[in-house]
Image: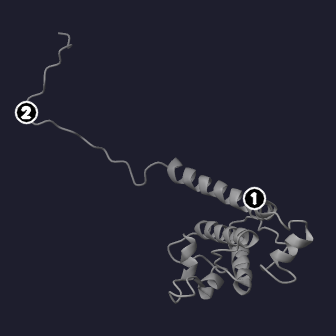
Amino acid sequence: MDIEAFFSSGDGWGESWVLDIGLVESLRFGPPAGHTDLDVAIALTRLLHYDFVSHGTDGKDRHLDDDNVAIVIKAHRAVLERLALEPPTWPFRTFDGPRGFGTYWRDNGMSGSWKARRDCIEQILGPTRDALEDLQELEYERRFAKGPTGSFKNLIFAAAGAKPQSCCATR
């Protein structure tokens, strides 16, 4: 699942990313048709990582705003819990404001350092990303450990014509 799946195309002018709030809210109850919780969790983790790093660095190309990032965090938590994974503990809930990432980084000595802010987001989401990658690997191994699906067939090959003579046959 791609990050773009959570958005509509917007108006083509000023709004290129419009979060599909109905879809994101529905993720709290299950994945959309054709996707697994693992697919959804990976995409939501990528989205949150991208947007918080973007906000903490140059602020460009962020997809979410203060109103809808909390909705995405709640959906992310629900999907991770269905996968029996520990959701990250967020010391902030928005980008700005008293409980925002900006306030958090200023209060915790990260002003003037994009690296410190990237590292902060990595500490929050890195363990989740690693656990999801482990689940992906288990899923891959499980899929191919079983071997081919279906039942075995007894195939008989027959040649048309005379049986060839073996060069090494003993008489």
From the viewer's perspective, is 167 left or right of 14?
left
Residue 148 position (above or below residue 168): below
Indicate how the structure is coloured in the image.
one colour
Q: Quadrant of residue 106?
A: bottom right
The C terminus: image quadrant: top left
Q: Residue at x 91, y 68 (%)?
A: 108
Residue 110 position (above or below residue 95): above
Disc 1/disc 2 C-alpha distance (Å): 66 Å
User: Of helix, strand and loop, which one carries label 2?
Assistant: loop
Q: Amino acid at mark 1?
A: Pro
**74 and 115: which is toward the camera:** 115
Q: Position of residue 109 (x, y in %)?
A: 90, 66
Q: Amino acid at mark 2?
A: Gly
The N terminus: image quadrant: bottom right
Q: Quadrant of residue 116?
A: bottom right
Q: Residue furthest left?
A: 161
Q: Position of residue 128 (x, y in %)?
A: 73, 62
- Mark 1 or 2, closer to the camera: 1
Residue 27 position (above or below residue 154): below
> Which is nearer the N-term, disc 1 or disc 2?
1
**45 and 132: which is toward the camera:** 45
From the viewer's perspective, is 3 left or right of 124?
left
Q: Residue at x 58, y 72 (%)?
A: 3
Residue under pointer 1: 127
**84 and 61: which is toward the camera:** 61
User: Of helix, strand and loop, which one carries label 1?
Assistant: helix
Q: Position of residue 76 (x, y in %)?
A: 70, 74
Q: Residue at x 60, y 52 (%)?
A: 137
Number of residues whose C-alpha sits closer than 10 Å to that of mark 2, classed few (under 14), some (14–19) or many (20 or more): few
Q: Position of residue 77 (x, y in %)?
A: 73, 73
From the viewer's perspective, is 114 left or right of 154?
right
Residue under pointer 2: 161
